[in-house]
Image: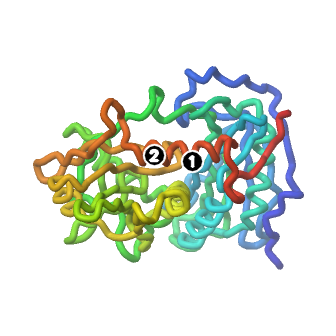
């Protein structure tokens, strides 16, 4: 029997009988409030993708032996929808998330799907709850597509059943009162990812082991880990974000924006890719080099002492950019410059403004914004 592909045209919608009202912006806490509906699609190895269904948000029913609970057959994505000034709701670069989601699924033997079909279905889900998309700069609808293996078996093997579901959460700015620069602990006593592993895949199994090192860093006064790898202590990521550093050559005066290369240990961040593209388009090449290269904690420390460390930040969907002000390493704190009187550096602030302008519809940039609903 031929497996059925994911088909958005077969969507079944069961509206909730108890619609809710959007909370005021000051009550929105990241990931704590959810919309009225969810999207679910079952898959079996025998038949392929079943009928997609939008239904009231509610609990899932799974067998206690489902492989997701025992062997971590689970992956997810994170993207956002925005209410624009011209009364539309758009998603930011959803095609990139769908590509990454399929890569993650392939790595743990879960089914792939047609990206455009899932984007259509997510659009229908958002349209169903469009009154719950918050308004205002920094406010958005966080979208969490998830794919799990649901085969009921304690045997370790390829799942023959899976569930793809999508839930949405109205969210406010990551930093309620503007930027707040963070202190990091350069971490070589725990490893987030390694060559040949799954550091470039968005698997839940990558996240739980990172919580303990974060708690240990917090006990020493740091908000996040700056993940290092190998004897060279290459910088890989910061917390759950991609890491960027800005250096300035004292001899030439030229600046360099640096982030780690995609070598299989680095998450292929959509915000990371957006920042690199915009920086290459908008920064003067006579004044800037934009490089994906290895950067060690020792390079950061030494260039800090010579005044060549200009600024640093993390990037990700939840926060866009997160300024860094200090890095603890071997008993010393490396100071990262900030703009006087502010909690950010100039490029960090500029990048945040570039991305926000596109997300909220003030600027167009290729096909980065996909219109989901027109509210006018």
- Distance, label 1 to label 2, CA atoms, is 10 Å
Q: Are marks 1 and 2 in contact (CB under 8 Å)?
A: yes
- Secondary element under disc 2, as helix, strand or loop, is strand
Residue 270, position as x, y percentages in the image: 55, 58
How many residues crowd mark 1 within 10 Å: few (<14), some (14–19), many (20+)?
some
Residue 4, position as x, y percentages in the image: 82, 70
* 24 in relation to 47, above or below: above
In which quadrant is the N terminus drawn? bottom right
* 241 in relation to 31, above or below: below
Q: Which residue is mark 2?
A: 321
- Secondary element under disc 1, as helix, strand or loop, is helix
Query: Which one is in front, 136 or 18?
Result: 136
Q: Judge depth for marks 1 and 2 and give the one in front.
A: 1
Residue 281, position as x, y percentages in the image: 55, 61
How many residues crowd mark 2 within 10 Å: few (<14), some (14–19), many (20+)?
many
Quarter of the image where one finds residue 168: top right
Q: Earlier in the sequence, mark 1 or mark 2?
A: 2
| Colour approach in the figure | rainbow
Identify the residue at image location x=72%, y=45%.
Answer: 90
Q: Which residue is mark 1?
A: 355
Identify the residue at image location x=18%, y=56%.
Answer: 301
* 338 in relation to 160, above or below: above
Q: Can residue 315 be seen by looking at this rendering?
A: yes
**The furthest residue to the left:** 331
Residue 209, position as x, y percentages in the image: 36, 54
């Amino acid at each position: 029997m031929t497996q059925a592909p994911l088909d958005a045209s077969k969507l079944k919608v069961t509206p909730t009988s108890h619609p809710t009202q959007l909370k005021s912006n000051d009550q929105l806490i990241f990931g704590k409030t959810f919309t009225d509906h969810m999207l679910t699609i079952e898959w079996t190895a025998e038949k392929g993708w079943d009928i997609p269904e939008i239904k009231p948000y509610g609990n899932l029913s799974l067998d206690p032996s489902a492989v997701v609970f025992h062997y971590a057959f689970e992956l997810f994505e994170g993207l956002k929808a925005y209410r624009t000034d011209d009364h539309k709701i758009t998603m930011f670069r959803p095609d990139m998330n769908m590509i990454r989601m399929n890569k993650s699924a392939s790595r743990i033997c879960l089914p792939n799907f047609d990206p455009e079909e899932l984007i259509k279905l997510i659009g229908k889900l958002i349209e169903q709850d469009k009154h719950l998309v918050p308004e205002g700069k920094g406010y958005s609808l966080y979208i969490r597509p998830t794919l799990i293996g649901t085969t009921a078996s304690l045997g370790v093997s390829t799942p023959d059943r899976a569930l793809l579901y999508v839930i949405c959460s109205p969210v406010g700015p990551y930093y309620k009162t503007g930027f707040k620069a963070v202190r990091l602990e350069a971490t070589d006593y725990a490893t987030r990812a390694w060559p040949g592993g799954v550091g470039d895949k968005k698997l839940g199994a990558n996240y739980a082991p990172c919580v303990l090192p974060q708690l240990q860093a917090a006990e020493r006064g740091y908000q996040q880990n700056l993940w290092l790898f190998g004897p060279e202590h290459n910088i890989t990521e910061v917390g759950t974000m991609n890491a960027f550093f800005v250096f300035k050559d004292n001899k030439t005066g030229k600046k360099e924006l640096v982030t780690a290369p995609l070598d299989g240990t680095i998450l292929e961040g959509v915000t990371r890719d957006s920042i690199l593209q915009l920086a290459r388009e908008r920064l003067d090449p006579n004044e800037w080099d934009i490089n994906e290269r290895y950067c060690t904690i020792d390079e950061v420390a030494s260039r800090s002492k010579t005044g060549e460390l200009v600024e640093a930040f993390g990037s990700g969907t939840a926060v866009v950019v997160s300024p860094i002000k200090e890095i603890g390493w071997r008993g010393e704190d490396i100071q990262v410059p900030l703009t006087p009187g502010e909690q950010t550096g100039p490029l960090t602030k500029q990048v945040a403004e570039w991305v926000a302008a596109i997300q909220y519809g003030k600027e167009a940039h290729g096909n980065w914004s996909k219109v989901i609903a027109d509210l006018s």
